[in-house]
Amino acid sequence: MSGVLRTVNRIVLGLLGLVLVLGGGSVLAVGLGVKPPSWWVYDGRHHVLLSTAARQRWRDAGWWWPTVIAVLGVVVLLALWWLVAQVRRRRLTEVLVDTGDGEGALLRGRALENVLSAAAEALDGVDRAGVVLTGRRSTPRARIGLTLQPHAQPGEALRQLSDVALTQARGSAGLAALPAEVRLRAVKHRAERVS
């Protein structure tokens, strides 16, 4: 998601900057006396961008206000989505592995997430697992979501996750600690008949 967000940020900021530079540059040029082309929005330094007639032209049209409100609503929703995406905690892209030589090596965060997820799904009673790494690359934290099968015991699943999956990941990455927040859910299933 961070790559998509980074691309969206660049596109939005680029388009916004282009609009502001072109709009401001055209106003400045006309204000300094440059003669604009005939199709331009305004034609002289004393000309206003929106005349009274232009502002009131669509006031009586039935589609005008619903269209304005809908467009402004979409703009507000897009702005809120962008703001939430900026504030949300980002996924860790790299983990610093201690190799013992003082240099260290970088491990892709997705690779460690996939290994942890596969190890968790291999545990008895776990149907699905999702792992997201957060924090700093030298001190990562794991957020794990486990979907348990109907017969699974939550306490046993957590113990196995801690003793097997997290211990192996911590050891293989050379981490001193790998704190984890685990959320458990049960698989939805039909009730069994008792006879």
Image: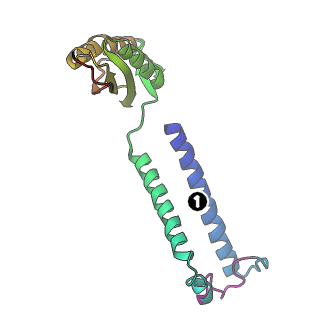
Q: Quadrant of the C terminus?
A: top left
Residue 102 in magenta stretch: no
In the image, residue 152 lies at what x, y percent?
Answer: 26, 16
Circle 1 sits on which residue?
A: 16
SS of the residue at dot 1? helix
Q: Report the residue that reaches farthest toward the right.
A: 38
With 25 as the anchor, is 70 left or right in this view? Answer: left
Residue occupying image coordinates x 55% and y 47%: 8
Q: Which residues are magenta?
A: 40-52
In the image, residue 11 lies at what x, y percent?
Answer: 59, 50
Q: How packed is label 1: few (under 14 Cα within 10 Å), some, or many (20 or more)? A: few
Quadrant hosting residue 100 = top left
Identify whether 90 is placed above or below 187: below
In the image, residue 171 lies at what x, y percent?
Answer: 35, 11
With 93 as the anchor, is 40 left or right in this view? Answer: right
With 142 as the anchor, is 118 left or right in this view? Answer: right
Is residue 97 at all visible to an observer of this figure? no
Quadrant hosting residue 67 = bottom right
In the image, residue 154 lies at what x, y percent?
Answer: 23, 19
Residue occupying image coordinates x 33% and y 17%: 126
Q: Nearer the viewer, residue 193 or 119?
A: 193
Q: Amino acid at mark 1?
A: Leu
Instruction: Characterize the magenta stretch by its predominant secondary structure.
Output: loop
Identify whether 59 is placed above or below 174: below
